[in-house]
Amino acid sequence: MGYVNEKIAPLLPDFPYNYKDLVFLGKWIDYVVFDWLYEGNLKKIVFLEIKSGKSTLNKNEKMIKNCIDSKNISYRVRHKN
């Protein structure tokens, strides 16, 4: 049921992001949101995990959240020769 909620949440009227700004990952992080990128004005990048009912973050999701919260994030470009 959780998988279904992850997929339909962006279609609900109260969803706070434009579905065109979403990239679905589905494992450990449900979506990466490039907020307002579709409009050509990127404001922020959000790592979004969708939970329903009494569902909570699992161990891996908590580690990812802690890493993001501590700003231990990088951006890399890899060129293949």
Image: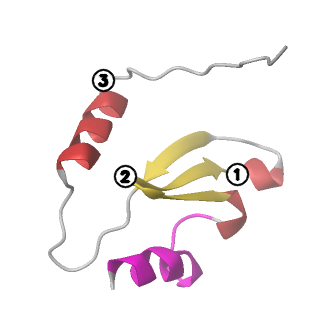
Q: Residue lying farthest top?
A: 81
The quadrant holding residue 62 is top left
Looking at the magenta stretch, what is its main secondary structure? helix
Give the residue drawn at x 55%, y 75%. 10
Q: Residue 42: horizontal and vertical position, in percent?
A: 71, 41
Element marked by disc 3 = loop
Magenta range is 2-17
Name the disc covering residue 62, or none.
none
Residue wearing tag 3: 70
**Label 3 crowding class (10 Å Cα cut-off): few <14, some 14-19, many 20+?**
few
Q: Element type at marker 1?
A: loop
Quadrant of res 27: bottom left
The residue at the far front in this view is: 81
Q: Earlier in the sequence, mark 3 or mark 2?
A: 2
Residue 36, percent from left and from top: 70, 51
Image depth: mark 3 or mark 2 in front: 2
Amino acid bearing label 2: Trp
| Residue underneath mark 1 | 36
Identify the residue at image location x=31%, y=29%: 67
Cα separation between marks 1 and 3: 24 Å
